[in-house]
Amino acid sequence: MSAHFRFCPQCASALSETTQMEDGGEKTRLRCLVCQWTHWNNPTPVLAAIIEYRGQVLLARNAAWSGRMFALITGFMEAGESPEEGIAREIKEETNLDTLSLNLVGVHAFQRMNQVLITYHAVADGDIRLSPELVEYKLMNPEDVMCWPAGTGLALAQWLRGRGIEPRFMEFPRRED
């Protein structure tokens, strides 16, 4: 269950874990026993872009990340926009680049973060200027890109395979969950 919700957003009563029969079987959810509001804990849609800039892939490093990990441009979809409008907005906000074309790469579950990743290949151009959220970028030839074994790294690997490039993956120490 989500640790983010402890109180009902409608009546401010404490939420309780309850188990009920729903379509598809028994489900445990956070519910308000006073007004019956339910926290469904649905995944959040996150948009991601494999930005192709003048024949190279643009990867960026987030200011909040420790280490020197570079990744795709990502952001949350906003109400009232399509995924295509949202990723073009994120590309402009994060890199100052104009999106020339978009093609859907795929939709992937990122269960650790309770997200659904909608990844696009974006051809973009302009003068790169990073937002304050990003501290550094690098441009790489597609065949030199190293993929990470989760989330948007899997989408990047799928895109590379579609271009006839067998992806190489970074090695990470195994996590003990």
Image (cartoon, grey):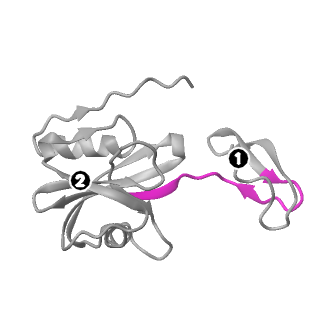
Vertical order, 102 against 118 (above or below): below
Residue at 41% x, 55% y is 62
Task: Report helix, strand or loop for mark 2.
Answer: strand
Front-most of residues 3 and 129: 129
Residue found 43% across the figure and 63% down from its top: 133
Residue 86 point in image, percent of width and height:
38, 70
**31 relative to 172, above or below:** below
Residue type at mark 2 is Lys
Q: Residue furthest bottom?
A: 80
- Which residue matches tag 2? 138
Can see residue 46?
yes
Q: Where does label 1 land, which residue?
A: 3
Q: Is residue 41 magenta?
A: yes
- Of badges 1 and 2, nearer the viewer stands 2
Residue neighbourhood size for the residue with mark 1, other residues' Cα within 10 Å, grouped as few (<14), some (14–19), many (≥20) = few
Query: Relative to 5, is 153 on the left or the right?
Result: left
Is the C terminus in the top left, top right, bottom left or bottom right quadrant?
top right
Residue 49: % across, % down: 30, 58
Is any atom of residue 48 visible in this view?
Answer: no
Position of the N terminus by quadrant: top right
Give the mark nearer the N terminus: 1 vs 2: 1
At horizontal 18% and vertical 74% (from top left) the residue drawn is 126
Q: What span is colored magenta in the figure? A: 31-48
Q: Residues within 10 Å of mark 2 (few under 14, many from 20)?
A: few
> Could you say where residue 70 lies in the image, as x and y percent from the top left?
33, 47
